[in-house]
Structure formats: structure tokens, C-alpha cells
Image (tube, rainbow, N blue to C red):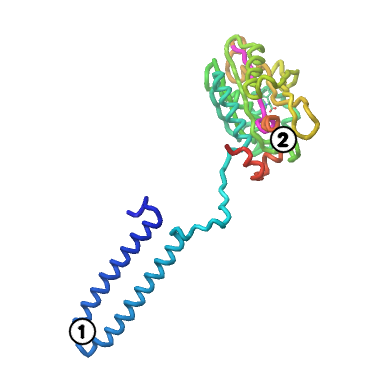
Amino acid sequence: MLDGLDPATRLDVAKGQLNALKDERLAALQGALRALPPEDRRTAGGAFNTLKTSIQDALEAFGARQGAAAGPAAFDASMPARQSWRGSLHPVTLVIDEICEIFRELGFTIALGPEAETEWYNFGALNFPADHPAMELHDTLYLGDDTLLRTHTSPVQVRTLQRFAPPVRVLAPGQVYRRDFFDATHAPAFMQLEGLAVDEDISFVDLKATLAEFARRFYGSSRRVRFGPSYFPFVEPGAQMDVEVDLGDGKGLRWVEILGCGMVHPNVIEAAGLDSEKYTGWAFGMGPARIAMSRYGVNDIRVLYDSDVRFLEQFAR
Ligand code: PHE
């Protein structure tokens, strides 16, 4: 009933209610006094008066205390203001959201896959030769003989192609794990964003045009990007995209690799159960942490994991 009233009014109402209660109870006691035998009435009357005074005193003290806390007298202009904190999304989350939005506009939907993967999805189906060094223990965190923490989001390519018939255009964000030490450029767990487009007659031109358009929308058209050759077992040909950035370390502009990409290898299309004569496609994988670093001029990846409020609060909007 008192909700929605200002504190001072609420206090007045409360005081009124307490007084009414006091009067009612004291009147009842007084009635009982009258019913006592005359010889008891005097002592009882004295006790009644003491009680009445102390209740009145207590009520007055209560009113004064509450009034001091709630009333205008509580305002002290010399008190320092209370600090208020506004939370913010983590820069890596901001970057992922923004990239997903750009690719959504380009016709992509989101796909997710498990972080605990089988060796087949993580390596075998992706055309890694059986003795590939990346499969050795120093790179991969194994959970069992055949299960591991995925080392990249590329297994989502295979899972998506198994579930959905082309045309397929998906973006797969997710956490990946590697047996790496933390240093300025490596973290043992980090986010990746996988992209996959598979259909009839998809060519390298689609890949380059789409990624260049992404870079224009993300970095602005004045930022330079370049493509160069690269190698991943699951693409052929393989490439990488670099962006020219200033990481704020006084060394000026330099080229930073922000993603690996390429035409999906026919063996991957076949492993997913599709006809590689009929379907072609391209894929890319990027690290949002690296992209956040290239966007915000951060040169040590550990800053993104420290949870230092002085860094994070710069992203509050
Ligand atoms: N999976 C690769 C990595 O982890 C990135 C990549 C994805 C490269 C798709 C090409 C195509 O580095």
C-alpha cells in the first residue's frame, strides 16, 4: 500500500498507523484496568502510566530517527557522490556481435557445434593426414582416446553439411582450445568465427568479394586489406587475409593476419556425404580476439582475459 509514495509521505503514514495502534491497545488496557479490584488498581495504574510514557517516547525517537534518514535534513551537499558503475559487453563479444550482424546482412545464418569433439570431426573429416603434427598431444587437449576439445571451429563445417542440403551459408562462432602457453599472442582457450558457403558454382571470386566486403563494412573503406597464399589441409587453394593496423605500440602501421580461408577441399565435401562434383564452396576462420586487437589497437592478448575494469569500462556505451 505504501509502495510508490515518496519516503517522507511513507514515514508520515507509518507514524500515523503506529499511533493509531498505540491508542487502540492502550485504550483496551485502560478498559481492563477499570475492571480490576480497587486495591490493585493503584499499582496497575502506575505501571500503565510508565508503559504509556515509554511507548510514546519510543515512538517519538523512532520518528526522529526515520525522519533524519528519509527527510530533507538527510541531504548533505558536502557528501561525496556515490560511485555508480555501468557494465559493458566485452570487446571480443562486441566484435563477434558486429561480425555476425554484417554476415547476417550478407545472407548468413548462425550454426553451432560441440566443444567436445571426436577426432574424426576435428581432423579426419577435414582432410588432416593421419600423422599430421597438429594431432599430436602438444597441440590438442584430449578428453579420451577419441574425444578432444576442438582445436578450431572447422568441424562445424562438416556437421552443418551433414545436416543441411546446400545452398548453405553459415557463420559458426565458438570457443576452441589448444595446448598453448599464455603469452602476448596466444591463449589456451579462445573464440573463433567460422564461415562456410557451399552451393553449386561457388568460386574463389565469391570468397574474395565477400571477405573484402566484410572488411569494408567492419573497418571502413579506407583501411587496406590484402590476400596471400596459405595452407590448411581442409582448403585448396588456401589463403589468408591481412589487414593494415596500428597496434598502438609506437611501431606504426603493419600487416596483421586476421583470418585463414580457402576453397573447401573436395575430400571435406565428400566426408560430409555430398557430391564434390556438384558442390563447391569456401570457408574462413577468424579469431575475434585478434580482430578486437586490430580494431582497438591492443598489442597483448592477455589484456582481453584480465578482466581489468579500467580496460573494460572503456567499452561501456
Ligand atoms: N581452422 C583454421 C584455424 O584454426 C582456420 C580456417 C578456417 C582456415 C577455414 C581456412 C578455412 O586456423
Residue 280 lies in the magenta-colored region: yes
In the image, residue 279 sits, relative to residue 30, either above or below, namely above
In the image, residue 187 sits, relative to residue 46, either above or below, namely above
Q: Which of 54 and 266 is in front in this view?
A: 54
Mark 2: secondary structure: loop
Q: In which quarter of the image is the C terminus?
A: top right
**Disc 1 and disc 2: Cα gap in Å?**
87 Å
In the image, residue 44 sits, relative to residue 23, either above or below, namely below
Residue 205 lies in the magenta-colored region: no
Residue 275: percent from left, percent from top: 59, 13
Asked whether residue 260 appears in the rendered view, the answer is yes
Q: Mark 2 points at which residue?
A: 298
Q: Residues within 10 Å of mark 1 (few under 14, many from 20)?
A: few
Residue 98: percent from left, percent from top: 59, 28
Mark 1: secondary structure: loop
Residue 252 shown left or right of residue 66 in the figure? right
Q: In percent of the image, x 31 and y 83: which residue is there?
A: 47
Residue 92: percent from left, percent from top: 63, 34
Q: What residue type is labelled 2?
A: Val
Q: Give the range drawn in magenta.
A: 279-290
Q: Which of 70 and 269 is in front in this view?
A: 70
Q: Which sits earlier in the primary sequence, circle 1 or circle 2?
A: 1
Q: In percent of the image, x 62 and y 26: which residue is there?
A: 194
Q: Residue furthest bottom?
A: 39
Q: Mark 1 points at which residue?
A: 36
Does the residue tagged 1 have its C-beta within 8 Å of any atom of ligand 1?
Answer: no
Asked whether residue 151 appears in the rendered view, the answer is no
Q: What residue type is labelled 1?
A: Leu
Give the number of marks.
Answer: 2
Residue 192 shown left or right of residue 43 in the figure? right
Q: Residues within 10 Å of mark 2 (few under 14, many from 20)?
A: some
